[in-house]
Amino acid sequence: MSESTYDVVKVDLSDGRDYPIYIGTGYSEEQAAEMLSSHIEGSKALLVTNDRISPMYLEKYESLIRQNKEVHTLVLPDGEEKKTMEVLQLILDKALEVGLDRKCTFLALGGGVIGDMVGFAAAIYQRGVNFIQIPTTVMAMVDSSVGGKTGVNHPLGKNMIGAFHQPQCVFIDTDNLSTLPDRELQSGISEIIKYGLIRDADLFEWLEENMDSLLKRDALALRYAVKRSCENKAEVVKADEKEAGVRATLNLGHTFGHAIESGSGYGTWLHGEAVAIGTAMAASMSARMEWIDQGLLKRTYDLLEKANLPIELPLDSPMNQATFLKYMAADKKVANGKLRLILLKGELGNCEFTGDFDEGAMVETIDNFVAECQGAAV
Amino acid sequence: MSESTYDVVKVDLSDGRDYPIYIGTGYSEEQAAEMLSSHIEGSKALLVTNDRISPMYLEKYESLIRQNKEVHTLVLPDGEEKKTMEVLQLILDKALEVGLDRKCTFLALGGGVIGDMVGFAAAIYQRGVNFIQIPTTVMAMVDSSVGGKTGVNHPLGKNMIGAFHQPQCVFIDTDNLSTLPDRELQSGISEIIKYGLIRDADLFEWLEENMDSLLKRDALALRYAVKRSCENKAEVVKADEKEAGVRATLNLGHTFGHAIESGSGYGTWLHGEAVAIGTAMAASMSARMEWIDQGLLKRTYDLLEKANLPIELPLDSPMNQATFLKYMAADKKVANGKLRLILLKGELGNCEFTGDFDEGAMVETIDNFVAECQGAAV
């Protein structure tokens, strides 16, 4: 743990498009104002948040930015089901109404939904303006705010419309997690577990030891988990910004998980909850194919459960084999009609992104999870 | 003139993203099919056109592509007023409905509106898929299809929402111009005149000699003018892909022109017509500031008139000083609140992109053009 108020993780990209992730607690007002404005190139900013975050943090950040810049604000409705092109257009309308030009900066204050939408709006406003991420959820801090994936959902699939657009910086204050609902906290932890499973055995083991501290929001534990996750994310994004290969491994559990989210109706599951079930499915399938041993499968299930995350579909789930296969066929990782999955392989901390797997094992895994939720044994 | 069926102008970009512009006539079916499919990376394509082009060329290109690839088609309503986010979403809907994945290719068959919308759809579909431009108008062949500017209009301004997204190739068959209405032909010529004014005195002089051949659609003249324009565009785009500087000079007459388009209501003017009046205004303002001499101003007016292009606002124009200033203030070239213009300076073929001009001369120029359309002398 550093002695300074904050740590910096750098995201190294080609063409000098590097940017910092600041991960801190107890920033002074002056310090935060200075840090944020140093990443706002132009004189004008648009600060966007949702109606859940707004009463808690909008005024604080608005006044921080106003110390050095002209700032406009916009409050959007909260929720994954609001991550649509229609809601995104409210951002573009606002920017044009207040006369923001190409040199302006958008700021996203909130969780993954706000970050994805504001980032995408910044990507397409006047063919691209700068933006800054101020994530307020664990999910956004450890995953969605870093790496430049932006977008909105489409009735036919999650994140189907979007762009790669990197922020100028990611500004994380883990103090803001004090107001996060437990369910949201746990949802974010599922992405931290993901880094452990796909590439960071030490982090996985640390989580096995420290999950209780994390759930109790111990400040040091939160900051360590967020920093370590950002380091993992930054390394992967550096190696493969546009997801031609290794970046896809960050989608462990997401192909099953997106199908569960889309098939259950937005609002049923938080993203990380659906990913947790999806991760259990991916691990189960990996074990079924004997790519990992039963010991690792059990540790995966145990850690997810320790984080109070679901590892199976509930009894009333509308998911069935057909629903899974339909949504999985529309996954963005499908290439020329061939589905590709991220599966665990070998020792803890290793995985493979591949279209070369046993389809029978995939269908059996789906059937098994579906049967459980229908009360039958397979 | 080359002896082969077609010429190739290469657009050199960083990171090996080079792509060819093919400019030809009389392609054999086999040749065209082969050329197009060689630029379609995946196995599936979506061919998009409008309801004016569709009866003439859709079947032809659909069958060419079908020789080697699976092809879906979509016909959009024609017109600049249809260049909206709502119409763009029809492309995304269609792509998802027919199950196109990230490896697919979109093809834009039509003029600037279709090219801009299909290119933008390709930029944001699943965070970016390949696309090919098949321009069918002079405007699209010499300007909008080359260089990767894509986007849609917003009620508060033209092309305010969009992305830089380069095509895999631009496939030009000047035979397709045989069905282009005269007004559209002339509209496209205004962009050719632009290249002459800003950077290519030889082309300007060639136009002074050969405008009649061009208006009569002489095959050699058309091909020469298209090729020469593409060479100019490719050089500028290579030097400044994202319009940090010199690329903005391609907007000669466009700041005034966009104001005229937006202020007169879409459908009143073709883009090139509005640009022609805008070019007359930019030249007039340049002369007013004594950046060019009266001789060059006269040659500019004469060449525009020779192309049957408007050089003044009509008597019933709703444009006034306030309308001009309002729309010009929303121009994408405004930076930190400061309007920047492209003005002619010095000998034929030279211009400057600058915020450092006499604002009085700008207002006087606007007043002068507005007064003319109101029948008064200034």
Image (cartoon, coloured by chain):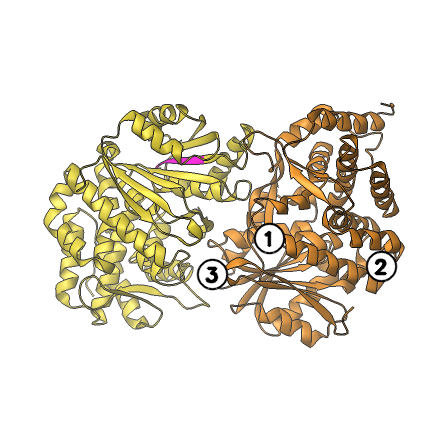
Chain colours: A yellow, B orange
Residue that carries the numbered disc 1 in the rendered image? B239
What residue is at 20 percent from the left and 46 percent from the top?
A: A225
Give the residues in magenta. A106-110
Mark 2 belongs to chain: B
Chain letter belonging to callout 3:
B
Foreground tag (3 vs 1):
1
Q: Considering only vertical position in the picture, is A203 above or below A84?
A: below
Query: Crowding near pointer 2: few (<14 within 10 Å), some, many (20+)?
Result: some
Let me know if residue B135 appears in the view. yes
Quarter of the image for residue B140 reads bottom right
Which of marks 2 and 1 precedes in the sequence? 2
Residue at the disc numbered 3: B102
Determine whether A246 is above or below A163 in the image.
below
Locate residue B365, reporting x and y percent. 77, 28
View extreme (bottom): residue:
B30
Q: Residue at x 13, y 55 (%)?
A: A205
Magenta-span inclusion, residue A108: yes
